Amino acid sequence: MSEHVLEITGLRAAVAGREILKGVDLTVRSGEVHAIMGPNGSGKSTLSHVIMGHPGYEVLGGSVTLDGLDILVLTASERAQAGLFLAMQYPTEVPGVAVVDVLEAAFEASGRNRTEVPERIRAEATRIGFDERFLDRAMNVDLSGGEKKRNETLQLGVLQPSIAILDEIDSGLDLDALRACARRIEAATEETGLGVVAITHYNRLLHELRADYVHVLAHGVIQRRGGPELALELETTGYGEFTAANGEANLS
Amino acid sequence: MGLDARRMAALERLDHATMPTSAEEVWRYSRVDELDMALFSSVMGGVTVTHGDLGPAVVARGAAAVDLLPEAPTEGDALVWWHEVLAVDPIVIVVPPGVSVEEPIVVRHIGTADGCVSAPHLVVRAGANSRVVVEERFEGGGAGLVLPRTVLQVADAAQVGYVGFQELHRSAWTIGTLEMAIEAQATVTAGLAGFGGDYARVRTDCSLIGRGATGTLLAAYFGDGDQTLDYRTFQDHVAPDTTSNLLFKGTVSDRSRSVYTGLIRVGKEARGTNAFQTNRNIKLSEEAWAESVPNLEIENNDVHCSHASAVGPIDEDQRFYLESRGVPTVVAERLIVAGFFDEVFSAFPTTDLRPALDAAVAVKVHTVLA
């Protein structure tokens, strides 16, 4: 198992001309689980999309490297081939395109053996309890919210990225699905050394994932860092102290 | 009347008819003004018909088919009469009442050579409670003109499937009509696929003339280079409680153009009509152009109608989603465009053609998304 590191330094980014991320620092190594928590509108989803290279976001400054490689100059697919994965909050429906076609194309692009894909998909489906009937359907079409998240987890399992960003993978999930997805991802941190950035509102996911670090993002910067106990604290106190008009007030 | 007499009568009508022009609403956006019939000197065309066990059903051709042909049209422009004059080898499929033909009947037309014209003529007469699927393919040839006319006469409670799959030479012109008259409780599922030709037009007339009749109209078309693919549709609700459901999807790339112009007409007697019309287009280049004009004309209040149309580039979120899995941009775009047609092909009345349809799309996506 090789060691990987995602290093985010002073990252600033804008959407439609408005600066959302105002200098984010975060380092994620193989096997670590980092939670990003924070109030709505704090820039959590922006962070995930900027790391993955969504064309709707403009990087204003800072750097993001994976194993020293500047990923901000890469296309989204090149970032994925380099070992990044984004599990989306709202997985996009792609009519007429089956998951197997996508993962085979991804394997081929990264020089892996595409013929392994169908068997890997079946194995992952069994592992997370994703109904095999869904495998023949078009990507995310006619899937419930929970099934879509299982589908994201299935793809993560097949692709075996080095670093995965989970953008509210727990939203819209029932407890069984949450547990199935979280356990699969947690297992990947052990089995393949997956490093995880989990964006969430809920302690439940962090408990299942056994988060090592918790970061509070508000007003476009990381306001506080701590261990799992910080998530517990937030569960009682809420984000009140971070939602003050002055975003710099609570820097710790 | 024999076939020759029928053609001679049409020739007389042709003498007094005028060519259509794009000034007429039904030919708007068409390239008919560029058509000069004097450039086409001889009649040519080749057709083969293959089928499985027909049982009591009949496939008649040429002179043998003439007594089974519906009446010749009573009016029309010069292209209508040109078709009648040039239709030397009509094919009529007769399925008697209650008979099911299990395997699709395949009618294959080879396109015409450079400077030649042909007029494929196909009639399907489906008796009450009968079932049949007919695949009509137009392929190859050269810089010729093909003027097809296909007529589906569908009696009470019959179920007819039809696919018109056009892969003519890239220099060919084709101006065709697909007419269906659907009687009570009968259903037609008609799929068109257009890939070839320089200018390729199909006018579809779906007449729901019996109570409870249903017509499902599907099309997939993909233009590249300088092609023009032109679809004109009429969903004519004459009888009560009739249903029509239209889904036409197209992709245009390079400098190609597509036209979708459709009209839902609901007559005074057609209460309880359900009529839907959806046209979606992906535009892959700046210079490509997709016209999409859905229309409604409703004379009865007790109806449920909707229409939708869209023209746009490849969906950015879909592309990003596939890219975020590690699929290179161009491969992602190919998958999305091919997948775009799946909804149409899946609804075709036969799965036989699916490999060929997918292959035709694959050739196009690899050409235009290189």
Image: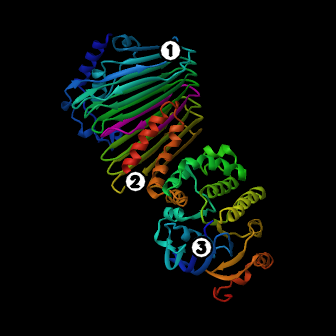
Chain containing the residue with disc 1 = B
Chain containing the residue with disc 3 = A
| Residue B290 shows in this picture | yes
Q: Is residue B115 magenta?
A: no
Question: What amino acid is found at the position of numbered circle 3 in the picture?
Answer: Val
Left or right position of B159 against B25:
right
Mark 2 → mark 3, Cα distance in angstroms: 38 Å
Percent x, y of residue B251:
42, 47
Which of pointers 3 and 1 indicates the residue nearer the eye? 3
Percent x, y of residue B359:
43, 39
Q: Residues within 10 Å of mark 1 (few under 14, many from 20)?
A: some
Give the residue at mark 3: A5
Residue beneath the point at 42% across and 21% down: B123
Residue range in magenta is: B193-219
Question: What amino acid is found at the position of numbered circle 1 in the picture?
Answer: Leu
Split into 4 quadrants, where in the image is the C terminus of chain A? bottom right
Q: Which mark is residue B284?
A: 2
| Residue furthest out toward the front | A1
Labels 2, 1: one chain: yes
Against A156, residue B76 (above or below) is above
Percent x, y of residue B228:
33, 43
Give the residue at mark 1: B54
Mark 2 → mark 1, Cα distance in angstroms: 44 Å
